[in-house]
Image (cartoon, helix red, strand yellow):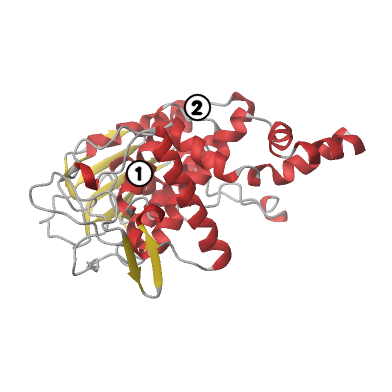
Amino acid sequence: MAEVLSGPPAYANWRALQAAAPCLATEEYPLFTDAWIVGETTQGPYQFLNTVPQWEPALIQPAIVLRINRHTDFDHITAQDMEKTNTDRYHAGSFPEEVAALASLAMGIRLKAGGITRRFEPNGDPKGRPSEWGARPFTNFILHKNPSGWVLASGAEGTHPLNQLEVLTNLPRLSTLNAIALVRAARLYQEALWLVESEPELSWLMLVSAIETAANQWRRTKESSVARLKASKPELYEYLAGIGRDVAVKVAEQIADSLGSTRKFVDFILCFLPTAPSARPAEWWQHPWDEPRISKSMQIIYNYRSKALHEGRPFPAPMCAVPTRFTEWLAPAEIPGGMATAVAGGIWLAKDTPMLLHTFEYIVRGVLLEWWKQGAPLDTRDEG
């Protein structure tokens, strides 16, 4: 039996391949999407095969077959494993869903994994064994488009070449904890794209959470828990340290991730901020791309996140709307229009609604991809 490695399955499987572990089995899964897919690619133990369906707008189809070579038995659970709760790798998704989520982030498209359809085993039928494990809920599923247009059309507009998945080669280079954070962030991004047309307010929350998930891990690699406590709450640190150094350390470990949440969120985005989109609307419909204006907008957005979670106030309706677009523009508006907006009992001034959801999605994807490409960056302290 191949060695069970730590980290999320998609990561552990690739590391096992690099360690020359034998292939235990090969499995195929359909990947459902509304995007127009072109090309094919193989990245490590994962092959993405184009089914070349007849593309129709808003129709979810199994446009890709994901072929997985399994090099580790991460599904094996012993009686000893069942003696305590362990959610270190948990993100509510299966192994193929991990790969689908990472591919969704890499390509910027809606993507979901269906159940296994075929399995190849050593010394088994060379043509594989048909299988029907797991449901395929996206068969014949159609997205509900707003009569005014798409809130986020990136999954449907244009062609999406599978060579965009080359970023996957950075996955096995990450540390275990960085890989876990990346997969969780990708899962949140993936789910946000599926909800964006029907529940944009929830999509906002998931995209903010995707950044927070990565930012938490990023901050851990930059500062210790004690350093964060000392910087954010110096008086509390001095009081706890006066009781005992071990007390300060224990408290810091418990509350460090909640310290300076807005600053951490903004700093992470500014550190990995992508360049402005190459295609943009008319200048007066663009969001400024300088750091002070981006920083201010991110502070406003994080404040709305807090109100949504703790006060039940959804993200402002103007920020969830279908973007304005004119035929002479290269891209839709990046910000809501008008000096103020009144919707469903709420009133917002333009200064309080800094950008539209599709603009934030562009930033979130760009930030996460840059963090991923830089190796997340590798933190040797959490290896082993």
Q: Quadrant of the C terminus?
A: top right
Vertical placement of residue 341 versus 94, above or below: below
Of all residues shown, which one is farthest toward the bottom?
Answer: 345
According to the picture, the residue beneath numbered tag 1 turns out to be 105
Within 10 Å of the Cα at label 1, are there few (<14), some (14-19), or many (20+) other Cα atoms? many
According to the picture, the residue beneath numbered tag 2 turns out to be 377
Residue 125 image offset from top left, x and y in percent: 30, 48
Q: Please identify the quarter of the rendering in which residue 261 is found.
A: top right
- Answer with left or right where residue 271 lies relative to residue 143: right
Within 10 Å of the Cα at label 2, are there few (<14), some (14-19), or many (20+) other Cα atoms? some
Amino acid identity at mark 1: Leu
- Name the residue located 86 percent from the left edge and 33 percent from the top edge: 245
- Answer with left or right where residue 159 lies relative to residue 99: left
Between 285 and 32, the one lying in front of the other is 285
Secondary structure under the numbered disc 2 in the rendered image: loop
Residue 89 visible in the current orientation: yes
Q: Please identify the quarter of the rendering in which residue 225 is found.
A: top right
Dot 2 or dot 1, earlier in sequence: 1
Amino acid identity at mark 2: Pro
- Name the residue located 45 percent from the left edge and 51 percent from the top edge: 301
Residue 174 image offset from top left, x and y in percent: 49, 30
- Answer with left or right where residue 122 lies relative to residue 152: right
Residue 149 image offset from top left, x and y in percent: 19, 63
Vertical placement of residue 174 versus 362, above or below: above
Residue 306 image offset from top left, x and y in percent: 54, 57
